[in-house]
Image (cartoon, helix red, strand yellow):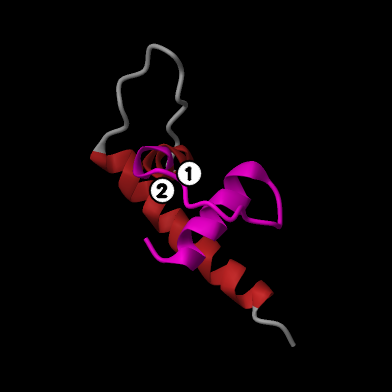
Amino acid sequence: MAPLEWQALYCRVHRTTLPPDMVPSLRQAIRWIATLGGYLNRRHDPPPGATLIWRGFLALHEITEMFRILNSGP
């Protein structure tokens, strides 16, 4: 995952404009991506499947493009 992608993902999930310095773990990033795809992450839910992760990646692509545009400056 490119730095711009995980930063955009973090900012979207946490509703902030400042990404952290540390890269999230792969497990955490997959959960966040699945959340974008509709995963509810309840205590008794099974792990996210391919469909939810795919939907999340589609959303992440758009979020990353917007993040890039907004952070590119004038």
Instruction: Give the residue at x 47% y 65%.
Output: 3
**What kind of element bears circle 1?**
helix
Residue 57 vs residue 36: left or right? Answer: left
Spot occupied by residue 6 in the image (x, y as percentages of width and height)? 48, 57
**Which amino acid does the dot numbered 1 rest on?**
Leu
Q: Amino acid at mark 2?
A: Gly
In the visual, does 51 lie left or right of 63?
left
Tell me whether circle 2 and circle 1 mark residues in contact (CB < 8 Å). yes
How many residues crowd mark 1 within 10 Å: few (<14), some (14–19), many (20+)?
A: many
Secondary structure found at label 2: helix
Q: Badge 2: how crowded within 10 Å, few (<14), some, or many (20+)?
A: many
Rendered view: 61 above or below 71: above
Residue 24's spot in the image, x, y percent?
46, 46
Find residue 21 and report its image quarter. Answer: bottom right
- Residue 55 shown left or right of residue 9 in the figure: left
- The residue at which mark 1 appears reads as 36
In the displayed structure image, the side of residue 8 where residue 58 appears, left or right:
left
Outermost right residue: 74
Tell me: residue 37, above or below residue 73. Answer: above
Q: Quick check: is 67 in the magenta stretch?
A: no
What residue is pinned by disc 2? 56
Closer-to-camera residue (43/21): 21
- Location of residue 52 in the rendering, given as x and y in whole percent from the top left corner: 34, 40
Q: Is 48 or 7 nearer to us in this picture?
A: 7
For the record, the magenta segment spans 1-28
Q: Residue at x 55, y 59 (%)?
A: 8
Tell me where residue 57 sits by quadrant.
bottom left
Is 24 one of the magenta-colored residues?
A: yes
| Quadrant (top left, top right, bottom left, bottom right) of the C terminus | bottom right
Q: Which mark is residue 15?
A: none
